[in-house]
Structure formats: structure tokens, C-alpha cells
Image: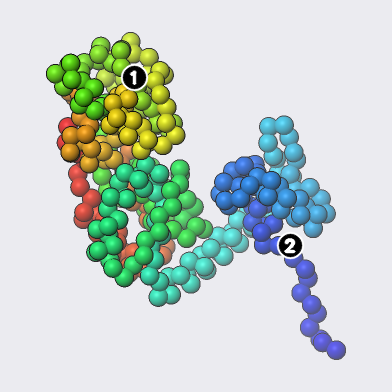
Amino acid sequence: MSLSPPRPSLPSLNALRAFEAAARHEGFVGAADELCVTAAAIAQQVRALEDWVGKPLFHRKARGLQLTSEARAMLPRLVAAFDALAGAAHGLRRHADRQEVQIAALPCVAQLWLSPRLGAMRKAFPNLAFSVVALENPPDFARDPFDFGLFFADADVPHCSTQTLVEDELFPVCAPQLLADREGSLDLAGLADMTLLHDARWRNDWARWLRHAGDRQVDARRGSTFSLYSMAVEAAIEEAGILIGHSSLLQAPLGDGRLLAPIDGAALRGPPLSLILPEGGRRDAGTEAVVAWLRETAPAPAGR
């Protein structure tokens, strides 16, 4: 007869992870986005955990979820446990002979800034593979297996260091052909009869720039909106209208003349394009070399 009693049964790790994410986000949708599953899958896992616990962990309300007092008391220990688990996993990767660098980037940065540089990066580091994931917001570097991120940031990211790669300026841009009858220039009054192009994420760019330029007449809400900034840039190149350009992303089309900045002066400084680096000594030699290469090769914003 064994003298060692069996370990007590535990709920599944997926159920615990789903609950922990839902508790932090105070909802299933945010947890689903974080874990790349559906909200229904999160709800199913949480229900399974509630069945194991024997009581509800959330109060289901019309405006979202509210933790029960018992669940709220348990949450900090779960958060700490998953952080410790992620730290151990990162440690395994750090000590392995790894040949991959994983990068998180804002979609427009991945498409317009990073993608044109990947060829040169591969040539500079032929023994490394590069994986790029486009995210709307910086990931949780304490848990997600990214080596660094590329985002517009003017504030600190928790548990990370932030280093400016390229300063960013905002100003209107359009195709030269759109101004064929205006001698290549435009004043604020001329915006009144032009189509304004918008990026959905940066929907307030026009309003911010017009306030900065001192205009109170142009309706910043009108025009066409695109879900991706790269689509808005392509529309501007194809003469569909005028867009608020981000200088750090438009070095190529401004440099080769596909786009121009028709209104002199009044550039608005925005958050810089930044390297976001996890703290805690997680970077291996390959990642350190790539980060140094990016710092050295990142050019200044395209001139106006």
C-alpha cells in the first residue's frame, strides 16, 4: 500500500487562466482578446471553474461582470502565480539556443516601418528568424513571449523600458496630382473642398491638427475612414483625399514624391515611435544585437 496520498484534483490550467484574465479585464471580451479565443470559450471555462469551486465567481450584471468577494480575495494569488509561470517559461527560452526573435508591433508600424526593413535585418542576422505579430496595444511582456515591441509611446509601459527610435510629426499629406491646379500648395481655407481621410485608430488626428493650426472652420469629422492606416495612406497616394501623415511612417512616399506636405508649417509633435523592451534581463545576445541594429539604422523622420 502506498504511503503517499494522491494529489488532490485541481481545475484545468485553461479554466484558471480564463478566470484570471476575465477578472483582470472585468469581462469575457477583453479576456478573449488577450487569450486569442472567443468570449464564449472564456465563459465556458469560467463556468467549469465555478462548477469545481462550487459557487459563482462573478456577479453577472447588465453592464458587465463583478467579482464576488471570495474571487476578489483569490485573484492576487492567481495573478502572481501566472506571472511566476510566465517568468519561468521565459527563463527556459532565454537559456535555450534560440534562433528566433519575436516582435510585437502596432499594425501600421509593422506594415509601413518594419516591413521595409526586414530584408536588411535578415541579411544582417542570417542565423536568426523574425516573427512579427501586429497588435493594437503593447502586450503584457511579463507573460507574452515577445522579445520587444514597436509602438508609439510617450509614457512608460509597466515592467518595460521605453526608448525612442524615431520622433513623429503630424501634418497633412496628399498626392501631388491632387494639387495640380493649386501649384502644389494649399492653405487652411483650401481644406474646405477636399475629402479628409481618417484612420480608425487615429480618428482624432484631424481635429487635433486643426486645433493646433488654429482652424475653427473645417469639419474634422467628415470624409472617409479606414480600419488600417496603411489603407488610408494608399488612398491618399491614389488621390482619394488628404490625410494627416505621421512622418515616421511615411518616409518612403514622402521621399519619392508619391506624397507631399502641401501646407507649410504647423506640424504637430506626436508620441515617438519607440522600442519597448521587457525589464528583468530577458534579452538574449541575438535580441540585443537586433535592438542595437534598429537603434543605429532608424533614420530621422522624412523632411517636409
Q: Secondary structure at mark 1?
A: loop
Q: Earlier in the sequence, mark 1 or mark 2?
A: 2
Q: Residue at x 67, y 62 (%)?
A: 13
Residue labelled with disc 1: 195
Q: Is residue 184 above or below residue 248?
A: above
Which residue occupies 24% across, 54% down?
Answer: 295
What amino acid is at disc 2?
Pro
Viewer-nearest residue: 267 or 224: 224
* Quadrant in which the C terminus appears: top left
In the image, residue 160 sits, relative to residue 176, either above or below, namely below
Instruction: Farthest residue to the left: give it.
Output: 183
Where residue 293 sits: x, y (%)? 24, 59
Q: Quadrant of the N terminus?
A: bottom right
The kind of residue tagged 1 is Thr
Q: Are marks 1 and 2 in contact (CB under 8 Å)?
A: no
Label 2 sits on residue: 11
